[in-house]
Amino acid sequence: MKKQLLMATLVGMALGPAVARADQAQPAPSWVDKLTLKGDFRYRYESIEQEGKEDRTRNRIRARIGAEARPSDDVTIGLRLSTSEGGDPVSSNQTLGDGATRKDVFFDLAYLAWSPEAVPGLRLTGGKMENPFIAASDLVFDGDLNPEGAAVNYTLGDEGLALLLNGGYFWLEERKADTDDATMIGAQVAARMKADDLHLLAGVGYYMFENLEGYGTIGDPAKSFGNATTGGEEDPATAEVSPLLYATGFDIVDATAEVGLTLGIPVAFYGDYAVNQDADEDDTGYLVGLRVGKTKAPGSVDFTYNYRELEANAALGAWTDSDFIGGGTDGKGHKASLGIQLTKVLKGQITYFRNEIGLDGESTDYDRLQVDVAGKF
């Protein structure tokens, strides 16, 4: 009994100060106010039917977690890790079913941004960053594309009405000392207006890709991603296949716009039109779309539909939407998506692609069904 009383006394003495401190509001460490953590996870069932190929079904995951630090009022440092297969620049999906092997994780974002207090509205960013150019759709650039280099964004105005000036210099491929590197220089002028029941967004961008024509394809040297190429022939003597080389350059002018209304529920019309001025043929792409509703509260739904045609040389195929026609250019078709907010943090979504691969001559049918459940924090 004495031993039990002694133990109880010692426990009380040890916990007493901690309990007393718990009753008092403790200030959070200073670094907590400077750091933001966020992430998301998505589970996807997918079915693909492509004419001339075996049907395919697969289960995929996408997991991302990032941190953004504000060591001072004008500096932001961001890092994000993401799943991916081989570091794909336009997809963070990982396919399941490879013997329960470990899944690859890559740096998806790694950047430093400076917003000098002397120039309100200015933001300078360097590193691997989210796309600094606004877009109403993914006609030219996949929504998951995070380019690498430097960017400048300047906003003149406020939330009601603003002029947006965006620019970037990005590295596509670093080559040997005696060979020019592949780069992209982009500039965009856009305007944004927001009112109670109306919002408008419109912009024109120019994206000049340097040192691609006559060089090997970006992303995968064995794939053209729909773009016109030369090479790829097999040498009968050695059985070696010559590399694929771009047959044209890319100087893309892209006009993008969105008009949103509140008619009891949110409704938005959007579109994109792109022309590659460096191509002699197959140089145009366009997209028109509609969004109805918005998922926020549990039980709320949204619906999205768009139709696009993207000629072979209208955009850099390695950077276009990875789901439409299986990725790349030289295709047309429909995309429809229905989403429902299951809980405050969980959303379910069904997406269907009804596409055709090949705009000149014979085409092949391409159908893709995606069923997603995603959560974020």
Image: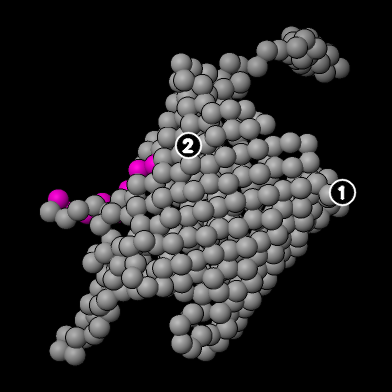
Residue appearing at x 25%, y 73% in the figure = 243
Residue appearing at x 44%, y 26% in the figure = 114
| SS for callout 1 | loop
Q: Quadrant of the C terminus?
A: top right
Looking at the image, which is closer to me, 372 or 286?
Answer: 286
Label 1 CA crowd tier, 10 Å (few <14, some 14–19, many 20+): few
Label 1, on which residue? 264
Q: Which numbered marker is on residue 293? A: none
Q: Which numbered marker is on residue 165? A: 2
Residue appearing at x 42%, y 31% in the figure = 124
Q: What residue span does the magenta drawing correspond to?
A: 168-177
Left or right of 138 in this view: 370: right
**Residue 313 percent coordinates (x, y):** 40, 68
Above or below 149: residue 25? above
Counting residues from the start of the chain, the first of labels 1 and 2 encountered is 2
Above or below 77: residue 98? below
Looking at the image, which is closer to me, 59 or 325?
Answer: 325
Looking at the image, which is closer to me, 338 or 161?
Answer: 161
Above or below 238: residue 104? above
Residue appearing at x 53%, y 46% in the figure = 203
Q: Residue furthest left?
A: 178
